[in-house]
Amino acid sequence: MPPKKKGKKSGEQASKKEKDGHGPGAGSLEEPLSELSKEFYRVQIRDLEDRLERYQRKCDELEVREKDFGSRYERLAKDKREIVSFLKRTLDQRADELADLADRLLGLQQAKEAEKDSFEAQLAQLRHEFQESKDQLTSENMVLAGKLASLEEFRVQKEELMAHLASLEEQLTKQKQEHQAVIYNLERKAVLDNDRLKKEMLVRVAAVAAEFRRVSDRQMAETTKRMIRENASVTAQLGKLSDKSLELLEENQALREQQGQSRQELGVLELGQKELARKSLSNQKVPPSAQLLGVYCRSFYRTTCLLRKSFPCPSALKHPQQVPKSHHWQQQSCMIVQDRGSKVTWVSPAGSKGLNEKEIRAQLQGILQEAAHALQEALTEAPSKEADAELAALVRRSQMMQKLLTLMDSAALLGIGPTLQEFRKDAACFREYKTGPERAGILSPLLKAPKLLPHYRIGDLGLVPRPKQTLNTALSKVGPLSSSTR
């Protein structure tokens, strides 16, 4: 490569010199070319040929591009001519459509004017009809306002009558509750009086038997006379108590008859009330039905007043008289028990047997005091007047009966009172009360205890000594029950 460049440069310089005429022998004959110059010219020729080929290819490419541009120009010119023709046709169509629309607009304006005239005529006719209907509705509204005023007055009268009817029903309910409370109190009092009389009789018989057995060794004759007198007095007292019990039963029967009559009248009043309500509902749309409803309400009120005057509450008249009598019998029984206790203390000898008898007497006195306290609570406490008065009275009644039955069972286990089987023989004459599982739980240890020998048996005068036996009474378990019921 370097020699070529040098040869090339030298050849160029030689050519330049020849052209300029400054070379050696310019004016002389041409000298023969050397191999190096030939080679240089050959290379230069090849280079020029290559350049010629490149230019030729470029010229061909330019000709092809020129043809392409020419075809594209012709196509664009053709498209332009077509677009211009299309736009001209479109413009002509739009002009035709515009003319058609102008014609349609003119026709629509004419139709609009015609419809406007027809609508104005219809509007005038509708205004006239609306005014007529308005006048008619105004007159009907005035008529309905008058009817509404009359209905409002009828509604006020109906509300007054219904309020009066509700007050009458409330009064009737209160009277019914008071009547039921009076009947319940009388029944409870009769049962308690029967239980109290029976218990007093049993206590007195037991006391007489014990006294007879204790003093039979030394004062048999005197004891016999005294027991005869005491038996006579007890018999007289029992006669009085039986008379009192009969009176209470008669009063109870009379009250039951009054209750039946009251229930019948209450049924009649309820039927009248239902008939009144039915007629009131059926006559709501008719104004004269209000007067008929008022007549029925006034008749119902008069019937209720007559019922109230005919059946007054007997609790305020009979209860205060019964309580002092019950207190009198209670105090008398306590005095008899204290008198028997003092006599036994004076007669009983010293020793282990005397101490045992004293313990038994103390236990008996405790049972009597518990019974007296239970009777006092049952006779002195008044039922509450709250909303749950009936429930409280039932609970109190159940507790009191459980307490009394527990005391009677304790006395039966000690041998000074009758057992439950003896009461069941006469169960048809008295009202039975059911006790809950509490009484069974309280009496279960008493029933499991060993059976005690009675203080008195028929034909036993106390001459033969009796076997000793430990006493386990239920006073320790009756005490918590009495404190809870207080």
Image (cartoon, rainbow, N blue to C red):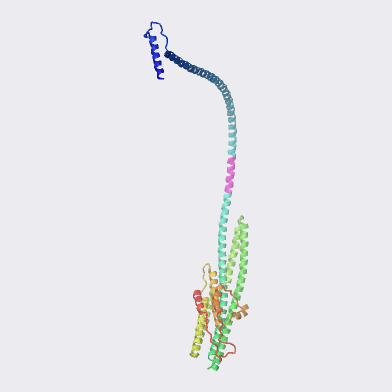
Which corner quadrant holds the N terminus? top left
Task: Tell me the residue at 59%/34% (across/down).
Answer: 119
Residue 207 in sight: yes
Task: Please provide percent x and percent y for residue 8.
Answer: 41, 16
Residue 318 in sight: no
Q: Which of 129 and 390 is in front in this view?
A: 390
Q: Nearer the viewer, residue 470 or 483?
A: 470
Q: Which of 434 and 123 is in front in this view?
A: 434
In magenta segment, residue 139: yes
Task: Please provide percent x and percent y for residue 54.
Answer: 48, 18
Task: Tell me the residue at 59%/63% (across/down).
Answer: 297
Task: Please provide percent x and percent y for residue 405.
Answer: 56, 77
Which range is magenta? 129-143
Q: Quick check: 47 left or right of 450?
A: left
Task: Please provide percent x and percent y for residue 356.
Answer: 50, 86
Image height check: is 155 above or below 222?
above
**Secondary structure mainly formed by the magenta segment:** helix
Image height check: is 29 above or below 44?
above
Task: Tell me the residue at 59%/44% (across/down).
Answer: 136
